[in-house]
Image: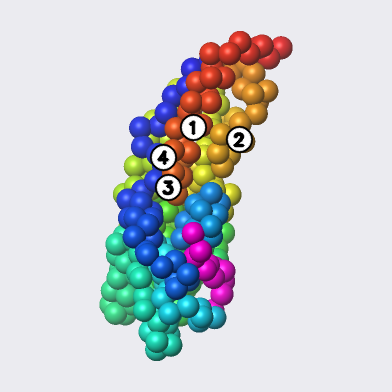
Amino acid sequence: MQVKRADAMGMCFGVRDALATIERVTDPGAVTIHGELVHNGEVLQLLESRGFQQSHEDSREVPATPQVLITAHGVSNRERQKLRWAGKTLIDTTCPLVHKAHEAAQLLQADGRRVIVIGRPDHVEVRGIVEDLEGAVVVQVVQDVAVWPECRLGVVCQTTTPSERVDEIMLAIRSMNGHADVRLIDTVCNPTKARGAALEALLPQIDALVVVGGRDSNNTRQLVVRGQQRGIATVHIENEAGLDPEWFEGRQVVGLTAGTSTLPATIDAVYERLIGLATAVLPSSP
Ligand code: SF4
């Protein structure tokens, strides 16, 4: 069995910078992390052990601590304002590319367009974008596309949306809203595009795929779905403990990729274990 790593995978600069900021916090007990900093169980446990408070992603309560850390996924300006009015000091780790998505949505609205956000309605980033808009709609899949009465529509994307999903939804929006002037500002971030492209390059070379990342990580799940769509046996694990040697029996070439909130050390540990399995003698499938 061979093991091939995707050329681009794992932690993006947005998550890395957020973790670096939190690393520098000297009094974790005074800080509430507003929502999940990253969708990565290991990292969240580490933060808890350092003494950080963490508010649930759906929580609308103002945290009790004097400082509030905004995660890389960002929040709406309304939420930011609410926290400031409550006297909180903000530590803002919003990824600059999430900021760009917010700005793009505002620009489209200021241009007189009804804004459509391609993404998951319950994703914290999407909620943050939508909360600052009037009458925005969220489209997760092609089936959500409708005929909208406005003659000017503007579209932005959750930063971790696969580009193929954006393409198919845009096709549906344009064909069902032929009366409208539709403008897309593609806000899918470059790290997501690079990881998607690296996976596409890897898929023709492998017969099995291991995807490493948190269960709640949107971009990790997208990588899993892409492997499955291409008919490749795909397994989603959070760390090396999730590898089941029996699953690899009879596999010839196994690909490895990881979501943007996966720590480099976790990927390396999975890779080492896969190499160990590859050199072990595994019986072939009948
Ligand atoms: S996935 Fe993209 S937008 Fe999200 S934190 Fe990483 S770089 Fe920023």
Helix, strand or loop status at disc 1: helix
- Most foreground residue, 168 or 106: 106
Q: Residues within 10 Å of mark 3 (few under 14, many from 20)?
A: many
Question: Measured along the vertical axis of the image, is residue 11 above or below residue 182?
Answer: above
**Of the two numbered discs 3 and 2 in the rendering, the one whose residue sits closer to the viewer:** 2
Hey, what amino acid is under mark 4? Pro
Q: Residues within 10 Å of mark 1 (few under 14, many from 20)?
A: some
Say which quarter of the image contains residue 122: bottom right
Q: Which residues are magenta?
A: 50-60
Q: Residue at x 35, y 69 (%)?
A: 92
Identify the residue position indicated by label 1 in the image: 269
Identify the residue position indicated by label 3 in the image: 260
Helix, strand or loop status at disc 2: helix
The CA span between labels 4 and 2 is 16 Å
- Residue 105 in picture, x, y percent from top left: 34, 71
- Residue 5 in picture, x, y percent from top left: 42, 28
Q: Residue at x 40, y 32 (%)?
A: 6
- Most foreground residue, 203 or 184: 203
Q: Residues within 10 Å of mark 4 (few under 14, many from 20)?
A: few
Question: Measured along the vertical axis of the image, is residue 6 above or below residue 131?
Answer: above
- Scheme of image coloration: rainbow
Q: Specify whether residue 57 is painted magenta.
A: yes
The CA span between labels 3 and 1 is 16 Å
Q: Earlier in the sequence, mark 3 or mark 1?
A: 3
Identify the residue position indicated by label 4 in the image: 264
Hey, what amino acid is under mark 1? Ala
**How many marks can you see?**
4
The CA span between labels 2 and 1 is 9 Å
Q: Are marks 3 and 2 in contact (CB under 8 Å)?
A: no
